[in-house]
Amino acid sequence: MACAVTANPAAGTQFGNTDNTPFATRADGPVGAILVPAPPPGLASVQAVVSQVAAAQHSPASLQRAERTMQLLQGLGLKSPAARLRFPRTAYHIREGQVQLPDLVRAMQGGTGLGDPANDITFQFQGFTETEEAALQGYLDGAMPKARMIYGPPAFDITVTVIRDDSLAEIQGGIYDATANEIHLAPLSGNYVEDTFVLMMLVLNAFHDDVAFFYDAWEQGFIGAAATAVQISPGVAPGYDPVVPGPFYCLSVYEAENQPELGNSTFYPASGFAGMLVWRVAMARAAWYKCYIEDPQFFANFNQIYYQSFYEGLPGDIPGLKDIATSAIGTVEGMNFYDWYERQYVLDTSIRTGSKLYTWNIPLVQSVALIAEHYSTDSSGDESPRGGQGRCIYWNYSRTLSLYAEEGYVIDVASSGPSAGEGYLIPTFYNVGGPQQITVQIDLNGLRREYPFPYAVRGYDPGENDLYGGLRGGPEATIDVTGGFAQSGISAERAVFGACISGARLTPAQLEVTTTNPQGDSFTRWVNVGWDSYVIFLEGGGQSAVGHTFYAGASGLLMTTLPMTYEEADAAQILGIPSSDLLLARWDPSRPPRGRYEIWPDIAPFAPGRGFWIRLLDDVTVALQGVIPEEDRSCGVAVDLGWNMIGSPRLEPVALADLQVEVGTAGAVSFSEAVTRGWMQAGVYGYSQQSGYVLAQTLQPFAGYWVRCLTAEGARLVFPPM
């Protein structure tokens, strides 16, 4: 097997997506790997070339941008002073336009099955002192049986040379050269448990070897999660704690950080921008560790099926890999794997172009740590930092008052220098009426993001709250927890709650959490939690039952919307239409020009304000069960530059004259004024089978519409209270 490329030793060969469908991409080669060209004349060895290319494609100077993020967290007391970032990578050799995969070629030519139970990895060492070699070999003697138990047998029976590479900086960690079967390890730091953790990640890279996944979110996420499972196994690395120093540990705040901006085809964009690197590595490990909590045999079962099913292209075929994961595990956190996967944004390997704002938001007791990453993504997945000034508003739990924070309301994001694209602020709140959910609103360069902060409910010490969080859609509820830990009758008020369900501190477990609001509506979800504590956001609003009939007409083609939020993710289940009969499509202006239509099942989930096409074979009457946007508050619908498919989030008609538009921090103006200012194109267009596209003066419930936004930063359509 080989991949055609044109080698570039400075920037690496830019593999990319051949199919950019969200959560279902396909790539033509190892997108995030270091690519080593044939040695140029005058260099003595391939090893020298590896070192040279690593310095260019895995530059310590670029990685130090990520290190500054960690230093910020340490300065705030949110990470141990002992934490050190390391970013091990996979490398392949390129010769005459081909990726060199000698072990795979031998297996294919010899008819040897991948992942044979007899396969083993034998290690030899180069460049280490006798003491270092003895320590590393002793570690591997104890760790390899655990690694095989967790990851299954290696893909190939190989010998791996572990090389002390003095040219590598500590932050690089190491490189697994899959073509040469070599681990290049940075000089040992003296921190045994962290040094061996890096070694184990590279060893697990060697388990996959020539059949490693093409995407960082999968390969780096798998090895980080599985190496954690190995490292905490009894007797492997005494004293190892994934939380302390835990530079990449984020499972306790996973739900707060799970945001769409995490997605991309690689963690290592060609420009070297590393603003998102720490967050992506951490979240990918946490996502796959949730699968391990679900089933400790997940990685071994997955790899067994992967090897048995292997075909050229499978390492970069996300639909194929998802099928394997479904066979290996079935469900995660109470959902089938497909639905669960599409809720984990770091696992979205599609490229979404445009300006982005991601905010790592860590809930403290009275404060929330905000680290804003502002950057843009081009059509190749490359990223570059952007500067600006983010303006903050802090809303109380009922969104009726903006709260005062002594630290201020501005996040300055540097446009250049070592921290380009990053800014931070830690607002602290006093005398705000006790525990409640505070919504942090940030507006920056036309982008608006909102983050829920459960104020005054987090615990830090053993015996304090280790499960805490907020409610969506209602201020009060009763919460019952069963599963790995249990507690009943937890009270939520002002949209927050907290309880110590473990008696001390959490350890990995599966929990079933049921929320019952004052109206008697109950919502149940499963969640896989890790160590220390867990912040969770639960549905607490009253569910409503709404019926509607879609008339197929002559063509069966309708443009529509569903003005509710659903716990169920499967569109076929929501509509009550067999999957084989369901035809849905949605236009996304942020996608590349030739692929802007999303086709079900690879389509954004139903949500208030989103429009879509549906083709029906017959008239369909649906019985919808979900949460309707609060009628006594305005409701915003985001639109991007270009044509957008929208719908009204209301169950009553809304006159176009009553619709408002917001851009950036500018105040809301009428739709007609937005047209005058050049924010929106005049006209909202509906569709009927009889007349085609028609101008609308009133937006009807369940009807879809086209609107065109003219501002590069996008806008928000604001539907008034009813």
Image: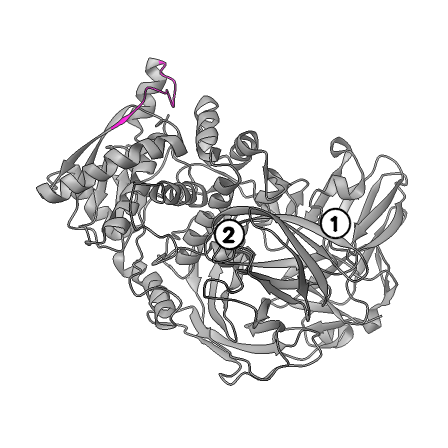
Identify residue type, mark 2. Answer: Gly
SS assignment for the magenta stretch, majority = loop
Report the residue marked by disc 2: 263
Residue 224 visible (yes or no): yes
Identify residue type, mark 1. Answer: Phe
Quick one: 561 or 497, which is closer to the camera?
Answer: 497
Residue 612's label in the rendered image is 1
- Where's residue 32, x and y in %? 38, 45
Q: Is residue 391 left or right of residue 67?
A: right
Q: Which residue is painted at 58% across and 66% down in the image?
A: 712
Quick one: 87 or 641, which is closer to the camera?
Answer: 87
The N terminus lies in quadrant: top left
For mark 1, give the secondary structure.
strand
Residue 557's label in the rendered image is none
Neighbour class for label 2 at 10 Å: few (<14), some, many (≥20)? Answer: many
Q: Is residue 597 left or right of residue 517?
A: left
Q: Is residue 114 magenta?
A: yes
For mark 2, give the secondary structure.
loop
In which image quadrant can residue 473 be found? Answer: bottom right
Quick one: 58 or 363, which is closer to the camera?
Answer: 363
Segment tinted magenta in the rendering: 111-121
Would you say the residues marked 1 and 2 are in contact, meaning their CB atoms lie under 8 Å apart? no
